[in-house]
Image: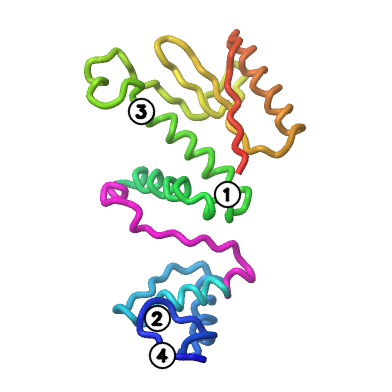
Amino acid sequence: MERFNTAAVCIPSKHYMVDITSRVKEIKKLVDGGAYFAINRARQYGKTTTLLALKRELEKDYSVISLDFQGISRSGFSTEEDFVQAFCRLFKKSPATYNAMPDEIKDCIGEYIALLMIDEPSCPAGGSLCQNSEWQKPTLIDEERNRDRRRMDVVIHYRGRRYIIELKIWHGDRYNAKAERQIMDYLDSYGLDTGYLLSFNF
């Protein structure tokens, strides 16, 4: 039995509600045209209900990702770089959202998240002990070129040593074997005997 709902999201099968089909189709035209837009009204005007209906409509033609920017602090909007980092951390905190993305986007986001984790390490001692320790933040170089001018994913310079890291998405044993040969070539070019292959299996 349907009833009037004055709180939270309206569900068509449970609540009396205005037919918003035509409104959703008009909004979809904006999406199809690549437009930016905002849905802005006071509380209880149906914004969330409209967005959920739009999501269902868009899923017929698009991969739809829902994010809540309230999870980004004010500092995350300070600069473009700060926003990109905070944006990627939202995916890191929501595995379900990450898994819903197309593989080509996963490759980009997953690799960037890994770079953030490397570039912003925690002090091994933790807390105030770091202030008096000899721990040093490593220098991260993204896509440094080796001596054959081939790009490597991540190279960390720390206390006079070079650490080579290759980042991959797991696509099976054959793909992994190819990645192993790739990092061995990088190590040979620098005369190193140890490297790191980091595979993401989402």
Q: Going from the N terminus, do you reach mark 4 or mark 1 first?
A: 4
How crowded pointer 2 is (Cα within 10 Å; few <14, some 14-19, many 20+) is rated as: many
For residue 134, which quarter of the picture? top left
Residue 199 falls within the magenta-colored stretch: no
Judge whether 152 appears above or below 23 on screen. Answer: above
Read off the residue under disc 3. 122
Residue 129, position as x, y percentages in the image: 25, 20
Task: Tell me the tag on residue 4.
Answer: 4
SS class, disc 2? loop
For residue 81, which quarter of the picture? top left
Residue 55, position as x, y percentages in the image: 53, 71
Amino acid tagged 3: Ser
Amino acid tagged 4: Phe
Q: Going from the N terminus, do you reach mark 4 or mark 3 first?
A: 4
SS class, disc 1? helix
Read off the residue under disc 1. 105
Asked whether disc 4 touches disc 1, contact meaning CB atoms under 8 Å apart, the reply is no
Q: Nearer the viewer, mark 1 or mark 2?
A: 2
Q: Nearer the viewer, mark 4 or mark 3?
A: 4
Q: Going from the N terminus, do you reach mark 2 or mark 3 first?
A: 2
What range is drawn magenta here?
A: 57-78
